[in-house]
Structure formats: C-alpha cells, structure tokens
Image (tube, rainbow, N blue to C red):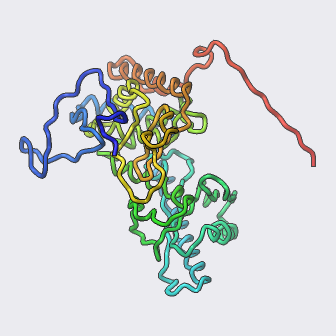
Amino acid sequence: MFSTNGPFAALVLTPHPPPPQPLWCGNGTVGGQPPLKHYGITSSISLALPGETDHLLTQRLVEAMKLFGVFEDEEELNHRLEVLGKLNLFVKEWIKEISKTKNLPLSASVSGKIFTFGSFRLGVHTKGADIDALCVAPRHVERADFFLFFFEKLKKHEEIKELRAVEDAFVPVIKFKFYGIEIDLLFARLALHTIPDHLDLRGDFLLRNLDIRCIRSLNGCRVTDEILHLVPNKENFRLTLRAIKLWAKRRGIYSNVLGFLGGVSWAMLVARTCQLYPNAIAATLVYKFFLIFSKWEWPNPVLLKQPEESHLNLPVWDPRVNPADRYHLMPIITPAYPQQNSTYNVSTSTRAIVTEEFKYGLSVTEDILLGKADWSRLFEPPNFFQKYKYGCRWHSSYSFSL
C-alpha cells in the first residue's frame, strides 16, 4: 500500500489552503446532512456547489466545443449501438458454433460477450471515431480459435470491410469496419464455463490462471470501468474530459507514442480533478484541472485510489520494489490491478512541454473566468513559427519495382 504521506503521495497543490471540511464518520450525520462518499486517496478540496455564473460558463464551453464537432448526434450514436448489438450477437453465435465443434456438453447454453472500453465506454468519443471492443469468451475457446475461425467468419460477412489481424502485437487485435464503423477487437478468455451478460470485469478473481495476453486485453476494460466507478459525477467528468481532450489535441500534446499523454492518461487526470471538486461542473473543473497540474510536483504519482494488495503476484508499478519505476518522470497510475504507469513514454523534454501547456491553460482559463477571453482561445493551436526560432523539416520517399 502507498501512504498518502509517504514519498509516493499524490500531492495536491493549491495557491491557498482548502477550507476545512467536516469529518464524516461511520453512518452518522453532521449538521443534519447525510454522510458523503469519499473519492480518491485524499479528502476533497472543496464541496462548493456551482453558481449561476458556473452554469453560464459551462454552457458557453459547450457551445465553443460544438464548433469542433466533438459531439456525436443521436442518430450516429444509435447506429453505433445497433452495430455493437449485431457484433455481440455475431460473437455469441460463433461461440456456440465453436463449442459444438469441440463436443462441449450443453453447448447451446454457452455464451460470450462484447465489452467496450476507451473513449466510447467513457462516453467521450467524437464523430467518426473508432470503437475499442473486447471479445470475452469462456475457457474452452482459445486465442487460436479467435484469430483463425472467428477471423474466417468475419471474412464471410458482407458488411465486414478492411479486415486485418495483428496477432503478434503487444495486445493482439483484429481490425475491421462493420456497417461503416471502425472497430478494434481484442480477445480474452476467462476461466468460466460461460460468460453471463451481467458480468463485471472489475473483479480481480477473473485474472486467475490467465495468460499475459488475456490480462493485457482485459486491462483496457478494467481500467475504463474503474475510472467511471471512481468519479463522483459521470456527466460532469465526461464534459470536462471532452474539453481537455480537445485542448490537448489542438495543442499537439495528445500522443502516447510521441512521449506525451494518451487518452487514458488524460482521463485519469480529469478524474482526479473531479474527485477533488466533487460538486463542481465542467467550466470550474477545467480551470481546476489546470490549477492543479500546472503546480503538480512531478514525479509524485497521480493515483485515483490506493493500490490494493493481491495474491496473483502480477508485476505492478511500485518504485520501492522495481528500480526502473523510479526513473518514470510523470507517473499516472491506472486504478485497476495490475496497476501500471500509463505515461512510461514521457521524457524530460515532453514533460517540460506538457507542464508549460498546463501553465498556458491556467492563464487562459483565468482570463475566461474574469471575462477577459472566451473559450475559443483555449482551443487555439500553438503558432509554431512564433514559438520556436528554429525548426527542421524531413522529407522521405521510396520507390520499388515489381
């Protein structure tokens, strides 16, 4: 366990000390109010409710974001849900077929299920975005079955386009378009006879006796579901995350591959902000996000919950035990077991860039709250030629003959 007072504490830095909050103990009440649920590894900074100005600023934020097409209309969302429903039935049909070929008793009652994760599961996907999904199968269905027989079944479906398998990837995946929707489909089998529709993947017991590829495939769903479980208000979280994702993309710092932060890292930073201001709405949360992380003392890690002990003995992020973890510069730790650092690619230079962008975001949002600027200014891309004195351009080409 990490101590909130130890060297790995997730420090919260604010320009002024937070107002004292009442201590809620047991099942009693304080001041006639019911006990509040505690979120995160520290108490909240403020329980202040939003005022009229907060609601007005949030509405203006929504209007500014609409110009960038970040919201999907109801028709497209319904189409996505319909496509996922068809894919789920397709998977269930295949699992019954493969169970029958293996002479499994009661094969008609055996089932699997499609789970989603990433931006779609969080509810912050944009127009035309792909869907990250996971095919969960019972114990008798092997990974080879998925990449051979299920792949062949997909190939025969007339609505499957651009089908390709990446079996040797760090997290093996089948990619395709289904009724016009791009889908990245992972695979995991559990040590269960069948997969019930109500299954909650957050249970650590599900990881027992699984190979590392199945654990990696399950990780996306488990982390996404845990993030949603750990925020006080999902709608406020989603709107704030949409704003921060748009800002990060516009400022050129949304990329795990390039050493910046990927989608899950941004989601965890926003979730931590929501934990600290559980009653705040999006406009306030965006400002508090920049306030907190422009002053964060890296490499103190960002944690959404205390890491829990487990007897599964899987490798987890722990700089006390793993020397390599001590060199991580901007650790943001996933909340689901086995806990990992989602920002292991961050370098000294990319951390400096992100930190400067946090400070820029704080300056802009302060002006917005004071009425000196509007939200569109936050989403302005950086001026490369104004920001850098020197630059270089690469041009590469190749030729081949048959």
- Please state the horizontal and vertical placement of residue 273, each as a whole percent of the image: 34, 36
98 relative position to 330: left or right = right
Q: Where 24 sits versus 259, above or below?
A: below
> Could you say which is closer to the camera, residue 335 or residue 272?
335
Q: Is residue 352 visible?
A: yes
Q: Splitting the image into 4 quarters, where does residue 45 fall? A: top left
Q: Where 309 sits versus 143, above or below?
A: above
Q: Residue at x 51, y 36 (%)?
A: 261
Q: Splitting the image into 4 quarters, where does residue 222 fall? A: bottom left
> Could you say which is closer to the camera, residue 213 or residue 48?
213
Q: Residue at x 47, y 35 (%)?
A: 326
Q: How many labels, in total? A: 0
Residue lying furthest right: 402
Q: Is residue 58 visible?
A: no
Q: Residue at x 30, y 25 (%)?
A: 14
Q: Residue at x 49, y 58 (%)?
A: 218
- Please state the horizontal and vertical placement of residue 364, each as a whole percent of the image: 41, 21
- Please state the horizontal and vertical placement of residue 336, each as a whole percent of the image: 41, 51
- Please state the horizontal and vertical placement of residue 43, each as a whole percent of the image: 24, 38
> Could you say which is closer to the camera, residue 60 or residue 107?
107
Q: Splitting the image into 4 quarters, where does residue 101 fall? A: bottom right
Residue lying furthest top: 389
268 relative position to 3: left or right = right
